[in-house]
Amino acid sequence: MKVIKRDGSVVEYNALKIVSALEKANKEVQEEERILKKDIRRIIRYIEKLDKKRILVEDIQDIIEMKLMEFGKYTLAKKYIVYRYNRALVRKQNTTDASILSLIKNKEATVSFENPNKNARLVSSQRDLIAGEVSKDLTKRILLPENIVTAHEKGILYFHNADYFLQPIFNSSFIAIKDMLENGTVMNYKQIKSPKSFSVACNIMTQIIASTASSQYGGQTISVAGLGKFLHISKQRFQEELKDSGLEKVELDKISKQRIAAEVEVGVQTIEYQINTLMTANGQSPPLTLLLEMEEDSYPQETAQIIEEILKRRLKGMKNEKGEDIIPTFPKLVYVLTESNTGSGKYADVTSLALACAKKQSGFRFLSKKVALEEYKKDVVLMGNDHFLFTKERKGCLNEGVVTLNLPQIAFLSNKNEEEFFTILKERLELCVDTLLRRHYALLGTSSIVSPLHYEYGAIARIGHDTKVDVLLKEGTATLSLGYIGLKETTEYMRGSTLYEKVGKSFALKLLKTMHHFLEKAKEQHHLDFVLYATESDKVASYFYNLDKMYHLGNMEKYTLGFGYDQAYSYIERLKVEKELQLLSNGGSVSIVLTDEIKEEKEFIETIYHTSLYVEVRNEGENV
């Protein structure tokens, strides 16, 4: 029989622990209140005759209390109950004092563990971080059940962003900027009408981003295709202003192009500088991702010009406070590959510029529209830099939150026994889904007035004033992400083979299929979009690794993200295998290619376009 402890870990049943506990309790009461050894044996026999393969430690303790009462040992039972109660109080004690004082005094602290973009020394950041510490404490002691808290503390799972769980606030989003700009919006109770020029549209867009970023804790994505119409409007205005000038058509076209180029430069510069100088209410620059895509029905020529300017500015870089050239962290750039910008497409030259950016700035990403439509039969919407939602309708959407599962720990506990591995996995998947439901329930019943720009004025939807957001927390608009860490290490430990060999690949596919199918069943049961996500957080990987190392589990060098990286295989070989893994990771996953692997640029772009949904280019020697 296996005993499931409060933290979710599994140990062998040991009757001697029951004997020891009751003998210690006997010493705390008068002799006539003590339990006899034969009665202790009766309790043990009762538990063992249940013939359970697995039993909760709380159930064992409940049985002991019940039997003590049956034997008339009421004082002993009371002592036992009080002891359990006191232990529960210890586990629920306040945990914020030391971390908050350490934060304020600028001592080493772990309060900014989850978000390295926040400077814990700035008072503007400290206010958010202090509020986060209070939220984490209340989440741990009151809002989450003990089994979830202890599972997090033992590295079974990772409950992301407990520092925001106290408030009705979600993770990442895709902002419907096209709708907001074309149909107007409201900010700070002031009506914002549709702009009449590209430069004004860029300015309004950055204000929208700063405002919405203050009411969520994850990243945001906007598609620059939403700006194409406004560049077209600017072009028409310039042409109208010049038509009575008496100049020849050639000269008119030349001046018009110059004015448009200047307008594009100013607008794009506004986006870059605003995003890097604005500070949101949660103490950081808006974590924005620009989706560089050319939609055929949304002024593709103008959009291509905007994208080209964004890429040129990224190649140029910015100056830091010392006047040194730097590549800004935000906005992150994701370039969408389509038929029109690959091969001999009309905008293939823009793609060449994107690849130049990718080689200069590590972390540049490419997304294949072809793979999305062919394999998923739907368009992919990006929320933040890494969360996917597949939909037939392009609209605002959000990710409610993430819970990440520690796969290597399951492998170590199974001791390479595959049947035991999947038994433990399924138990932990149930716990993860229950934990994700806590995220969902925390948002249910929330009124749209908590963030009007998101819910009432178009960023996500326009559901009306003081309306419950429940109508948005459903399939097709909101996702709940089950993340995983250490797929590479788990596969190699269980099968002694890499992901790219037949034996290792079959195990990795079986593992992800099991998780994917489990979430699909949960989706059917709860009518919620549970998705599988290759968690992108070095911090979480380190958290799991360090805890497992402390508990003497495994002897790995580290836990990697996503599918890891194996230099023994070419990127073409890796992407072909990882495509199958990406298809199962429908909540988000990215493949890695290093810059020094890209010998033939056209071959690289064509490989991604036809083979891989999502690829990140990193510099040689960077941590992979």
Image: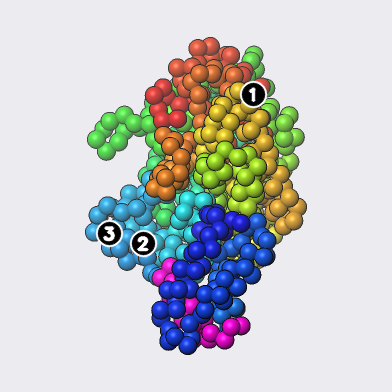
- The image quadrant where one finds the C terminus is top left
Instruction: Determine whether, in the image, residue 380 is placed left or right of residue 133.
Output: right
Magenta-tinted stretch: 70-91
The number of numbered badges drawn on the structure is 3
Q: Write the residue at 64% across / 70% down.
A: 46
Q: Write the residue at 48% across / 82% down.
A: 34
Could you tell which of marks 1 and 2 lies nearer the N-terminus? Answer: 2
Residue 420 is inside the magenta segment:
no
Residue 73 is inside the magenta segment:
yes
**Image disc number at residue 102:** 3
For badge 2, the amino acid type reads Ile
For badge 1, the amino acid type reads Lys
For badge 3, the amino acid type reads Ser
**Tag 2 near tag 3, CB within 8 Å:** no
334 vs 619: above or below: below
In the picture of the structure, the residue carrying the numbered disc 1 is: 502
Nearer the observer, 267 or 96: 96
In the picture of the structure, the residue carrying the numbered disc 2 is: 130
Element type where label 3 sits in the image:
helix
Residue 405, image x, y percentages: 55, 47
Residue 317, image x, y percentages: 38, 29
130 vs 40: above or below: above
**Residue reaching furthest front?**
38
Nearer the observer, 173 or 44: 44
Give the mark toward the camera: 3 or 1: 1
Spatial separation of the CA atoms under disc 2 and disc 3: 11 Å
Could you tell which of marks 3 and 1 lies nearer the N-terminus? Answer: 3
Residue 293, image x, y percentages: 60, 31
307 vs 451: above or below: above
Q: Write the residue at 25% across / 55% down.
A: 106
